[in-house]
Image (cartoon, rainbow, N blue to C red):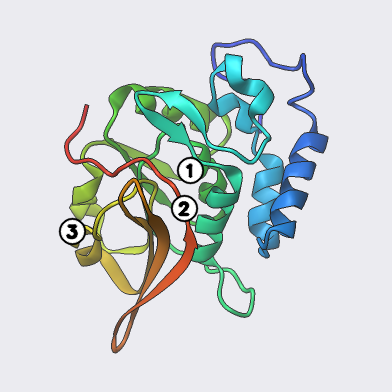
Amino acid sequence: MNPSRPGQRRRSGIGLTSARVRDRLADSLRERGIRSPEVLEQIRRTPRHLFIEEALERYAYNDNALPIGSGQTISQPYVVALMTQALLMEEDGRMRRPAKVLEVGCGSGYQTAILAPLVRSVFSIERIGSLLAEARPLLAELGCNNVRFRHGDGMLGWPGQAPFDGILVAAAAAAVPQALLDQLAPGGRLVIPLGDHSRQELVRIERGESGDVRESLAPVAFVPLLPGQG
């Protein structure tokens, strides 16, 4: 990965391009229960400071969510790692490598950058055009060449590319959108935060032969999943 945003100067004044700061972040996530070596390696490799405003870059490797504009946030690294692990890791520690993953809510692109090297292809939807316009060239610069993008309503999924082996939703819904359930392949997994502003939980739904199996993973706090596009 090239640690410079396209069209911007290389940022190096406060050591954010150093592997040491990302190593410390990955170590802290492992201590919190992230078990997948593959996910932790992507945390180490991915320059999170490129996905946030320069004024906030000193906080880039703290385990916190940060604003990215348009009322949206970049999720805290622990939650990004947890969602990726929940989507891809089996109980015995082996990692799935799904052929097609739908990401609802590209946002800054940080979750996409963590996910893309671990799967064959990502189909990423973002409802806010200005965020997508920033994320797309940055992800290309970082070598995420297996990602296709769409500006649209994530609650509707991407019917033309369905079914998906995995679906990851980066915003909270009151209930799982039926369109997303309809686009989940047999054996696939859907990871989504459910709830309102007062209480949310991260949920994994796995499509088995005898029906969907739902598991609550952790309390979380996400911006709401909204219809339409802007």
Residue at horizontal 68%, vertical 65%? Answer: 35
Classed neighbour count for the residue bearing mark 3: other residues with Cα under 10 Å, few (<14), some (14–19), many (≥20): some
Closer-to-camera residue (73/8): 73
Q: Earlier in the sequence, mark 2 or mark 3?
A: 3
Q: Residues within 10 Å of mark 2 (few under 14, many from 20)?
A: some
Q: Nearer the viewer, mark 2 or mark 3?
A: 2
Q: Secondary structure at mark 3?
A: helix
Instruction: Tell me the quadrant of the picture where the N terminus can be found.
Output: top right
Question: Label 2 sits on what residue type?
Answer: Val
Q: Residue at x 43, y 69 (%)?
A: 216
Q: Where is residue 61, by image quadrant? A: top right
Instruction: Find disc 3 in the rendering and name its residue.
Output: 179
What is the secondary structure assignment of the residue under circle 1?
A: helix
Q: Position of residue 20 (x, y in %)?
A: 82, 36
Whole-percent x and y of residue 111? 50, 43
The one nearer the camera, 96 or 226, is 226
Q: Is residue 97 visible?
A: no
Label 2, on which residue? 220
Is 149 above or below relative to 53? below
> Eyeballing the image, is 219 above or below 214?
above
Query: What's the residue type where badge 3 is placed?
Result: Ala
> What is the spatial separation of the Cα atoms under label 2 and label 3, in whole angstroms?
23 Å
Q: Residue at x 47, y 58 (%)?
A: 219
Q: Amino acid at mark 1?
A: Thr
For residue 152, side relative to residue 77 (left or right): left
Disc 1 designates what residue? 112
Residue beneath the point at 69% across and 16% down: 11
Q: Secondary structure at mark 2?
A: loop
Spatial CA span between label 2 and label 1: 19 Å
**Looking at this view, is 187 or 67 the one in front?**
67
Give the side of residue 214 with respect to residue 225, left or right.
right
> Is residue 150 visible in this depiction of the protein?
yes
